Image (cartoon, coloured by chain):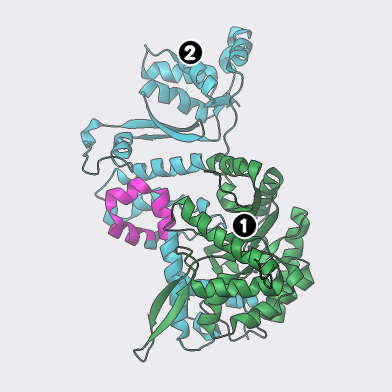
Chain colours: A green, B cyan
Amino acid sequence: MRPRVALVEATSENCFGGGRHLDALLEVRREHAVSLHGVGLSIGSTDPLDERHLVRLAALVERVEPALVSDHLCWSSVGGIYANDLLPLPYTEEALAHVAERVERVQERLGRRILVENVSSYLEYSASEMSECEFLAALAQRAGCGVLLDVNNVYVSAANHGFDARTYLHAIAPESVHEVHLAGYSVNLVRRDDGSDAQILIDTHSRPVSEPVWQLYRDAIRLLGPKPTIVEWDADLPPLAGLVAEADKAERWLREAHAPNDASG
Amino acid sequence: MPTLRELQVDVLDALIGRSGRAAAHVAASGLLPERRLDIYRNNLFQSLTEALAAVYPTLDKLVGRGFFRTLAHAFIVAHPSRSGNVHEFGAELPEFVARFDAARSLAYLPDCARLDWAWHAVFHTEAAPPLDAAAMLAQIAALPDAARAGVRFALQPACRLVASPYPIFSIWVANRGDADGAAQVDLHLGGEQVLVAQQGGEVAVERLANAEHALLDAFAAGGSLGEAFGAALAADPGFDAARSFAHHLARGTVMRA
């Protein structure tokens, strides 16, 4: 099946070893634009940047010639040990200066701009001096990187921390956003000490995009303009047609954003 | 206020389960800091356990998921991930299994795990393209006898040899995704040697006769043509070492060192 999609995204580290993953990606690349999305750069870590990782990423970028390269606003390692998860940063001036410098070095190393994606989170730090969206906006400005806006992550984090998702959208400069992610989430119940249950949304990428997230996406596109959008699905995969249907839904919202007042549309 | 580094050290320590300093750094709102850290800790152990199960499917099937989870948990604490590329995680598991008390009675487990890792390593390694075997053979044939025996070869990066006193190939086959789960393997079948290599973009696992294994093993150790042929013929005087060597040259298993 050759779906008519505008952009295909692969997890960069999956292709580091070459082989079938890379072969498949190169074949996709013949017909589609490709986005390389990393999970292992650990851009916010206070460890030195992993030179070996950068070498492999640079080699992959050279091989694939992607339209977009991205990783996450997070840290995943310290003292040489990796959680292999996307841990949120405290939003402090110290962290901002640190992450901006790291992003600049990665961009210099790769010879191109990267996009930094907002993660979904389940905790915030008392040391934070600003909101996540203020931090991300300031980072994009300071480091000259782009933003990969994950609308599902905005929704999940907003629900988990009690902030307004739409405030988040307004904080990011539209011209800094170069890609958008959509995905499904799951709801977990966590027992509080008083015996009541708290709802936590978990960014599982194993379900269809939820209705409130489609609405947030619609608002994001109206505010920011049309942006290349990837629908992510990592577990409990549907048949390819199911994933393409989700992409088609995003396509419809993108077209609607072009002409929201077109009475004949 | 903690520095960024202090905060990161405390949080990672909390996730791998070694200290409780991180809770003090987490904003308390609605849910206790410890519960929020629990979410990340559970994610860490769950996703790394799933990664290990995907890399070690034979081991997972042999011990059952309940035991595998216990083993994985202990392994993650003892040998946490050291790479942002999760595909590099888990190399030490075969040795860890060998030292894991509860697995002692299943002496074949470590070598079965080694075979699983070999498959994973070969999958994630860029294969060197096969050289022009005919030209190489002609080159070798043109050398004076003494020089010919001294030419060194190596195994290509995208292949592994795994040898065991246990029937690890038969066990691997019996536990493959599409195999009948009730298949039993008689441990008295004895030892088996396996070559894991890429073929047509797929990972191929094949059982080797003693002599063929001895030939390739000699090359894996940086041996010369003479040494490799000698080792093969010592294992089986009737083995056609030259034919096997030509076959592996053509397939790209061996390359000039």
Marks 1/2: CA–CA distance: 47 Å
Q: Which residue bears the numbered disc 2? A: B242
Q: Residues within 10 Å of mark 2 (few under 14, many from 20)?
A: few
Residues B147 and A101: in front is A101
Q: Quadrant of the C terminus of chain A?
A: bottom right
In this view, the residue in front, B169 or A231, is: A231
Numbered circle sitting on residue B170: none
Residue visible at 70% across and 53% down in the picture: A67
- Residue to which mark 1 is pinned: A37
Question: Quick check: can you spot residue A189?
Answer: yes
Q: Secondary structure at mark 1?
A: strand
Answer with left or right where residue A129 lies relative to residue A144. Answer: left
In terms of image quadrants, where is residue B188? top left
Mark 2, secondary structure of its residue: helix
Residue at image point 46% right, 49% down: B91
- Left or right: where A173 falls relative to B58: right
Label 1 CA crowd tier, 10 Å (few <14, some 14–19, many 20+): many
Q: Which portion, as a residue range, is magenta?
A: B49-72
Q: Is the residue under label 2 in contact with that under label 1 (CB below 8 Å)? A: no
Q: Position of residue A191 (x, y in %)?
A: 37, 83
Query: Is residue A29 a member of the stretch shown in magenta?
Result: no
Q: Which image quadrant is residue A103 in? A: bottom right
* Residue A198 percent coordinates (x, y): 41, 84
Q: Is residue A137 above or below residue A241?
A: below
User: Could you say which quadrant of the image residue A25 lies in?
Assistant: top right
The location of residue B110, given as percent across then percent down, is 35, 45
Magenta stretch secondary structure, dominant: helix
